Amino acid sequence: MTENTAGSGQIYVALKPLTFICALFGLFPCSFGRNRADRTEPTVCVFLNIVCSLVWICLFAVRLCLKLLHLSSDNVTKVRILTEMSVISTHFTSIICLVHLSIVCKNKFIRLLEKVSQADYGLFTLSEEKYVNRRTNFIIITELAVMLLLFISYEISYEIYTAQTRSKREVLDYITQVITLSSYICNTLTVLLINNCVLIVTQRQRHLNKQLTTFISCPNRVNKISYCGHIKPINKRNATTPYVSLIRVETSNHVSGNQEIHSIRILYNQLYDVACIVNYLYGLPLLAMSCWILLDLVLITYVAVTSLDVDFIITNSKDIIFFLIFLKMIIMCQISENEIQSSIILVQKVMLEDDLGYKDCKELLMLSAQLRDMKIKYTACKFFTLNLPYLCSVVGAVVSYVIIMIQIE
């Protein structure tokens, strides 16, 4: 093993633009230095990241406390109550994201990437891994560019509108606006982290499904799944624990069908472990975001139905931006869920083949049971699963609350 045994795969390079921006907002208190295996020895970069986390936590906490102190019973309306609750929820969600990701689970993200690196070792050839991670890197850079463009456009539009309709603002108002916008960016970066973790798992699920499809379409049962350790020499790979190397045949490309299926079972197990880490790492932030989004959707829908206020729409445009990014993440979670369903169907089709041996059938039965019992899905602390049915339930809840609010005088 080399000094980079903690996983020096290309996945680290692919995620570096996102993790760099997240580190500025205190969401990533780790370092991608050369000695990633030794996480007990703090570096200057890790120290600075922790300082960023504490600074943002303090700023959001102060803003939250000031908002709570300025609440009054004068001129209370339903819209004003919901607006104040929305602002409070925004900063509260940011604090939860920072505390949970940078303090409670500060090393979990590195562990997640180590697991992905292990799976890549057994799943891709070097060229395939390079292509997949380049594509991931391009998607990340595009998402960051779009996010920054949207929030910068919002801020410019908001300042222009404010300058035309309101009197001169004080310096404190600008500071408050910057902290609030930073809170939205912090929450959005957390969503992008989740989205790209789900994307990484989905890409690897899709690749495994292609191998299963090859298994069905190829009449020759010898070495029809040409992935990973069957053809790649050990010294060209860097991973923590290359499980699939246990079945590599160094002198021949001949691998029996049951060994191939067993290798697929191991790879699915590794992807399931990655999904479990994602759920543990982001479950609590997702729960806080879901409550905040429900509150915002009720507020925006109620105002849109009762009185279309231009000032309100411009002020809350950033909520709409965040919801669209959150919606993209839910769709990605649904795609990942569809991939695992496709895997189950493909295994059943393989079992219908006539020329399967006893050991092959046994491995396929165990793979089928594994896919049913170890379904990859993404939840918010196991309260609900992020998929399209969840969106339907959110829409139903929003409609119900809006109707109740309209009826209340």
Image (cartoon, rainbow, N blue to C red):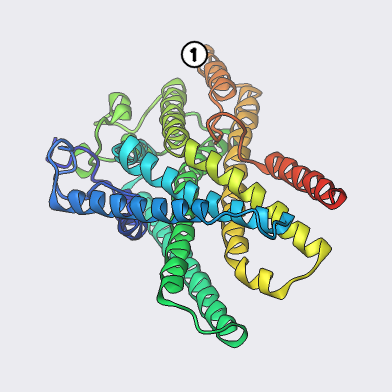
**Closest to the observer: 229 or 238?**
238
Q: Position of residue 274 (x, y in %)?
A: 42, 34
Q: Is residue 245 left or right of residue 33?
A: right
- Residue reaching furthest right? 407
Q: Position of residue 278 (x, y in %)?
A: 44, 37
Q: Is residue 335 above or below residue 256?
A: below
Q: Is residue 250 left or right of residue 255?
A: left
Number of disc labels:
1
Residue 335 visible, this orientation: no
Q: Secondary structure at mark 1?
A: helix
Identity of the amino acid at label 1?
A: Lys
Q: Position of residue 324 (x, y in %)?
A: 61, 59
Q: Residue at x 76, y 62 (%)?
A: 303
Of the 4 image quadrants, the one containing the N terminus is: top left
Q: Is residue 231 left or right of residue 207?
A: left
Q: Is residue 84 above or below residue 343?
A: below
Q: Residue at x 57, y 59 (%)?
A: 322
Q: Residue at x 53, y 51 (%)?
A: 88
Q: Using a 10 Å C-alpha cutoff, classify the residue at mark 1 as few (fewer than 14 neighbours), some (14 to 19) or many (20 or more).
A: some
- Residue reaching furthest bottom? 164
Residue 334 visible, this orientation: yes
**Closest to the observer: 345 or 67?**
67
Q: Residue at x 35, y 38 (%)?
A: 112
Q: Position of residue 197 (x, y in %)?
A: 44, 45
**Closest to the observer: 281 or 118?**
281
**For mark 1, what is the residue?**
359
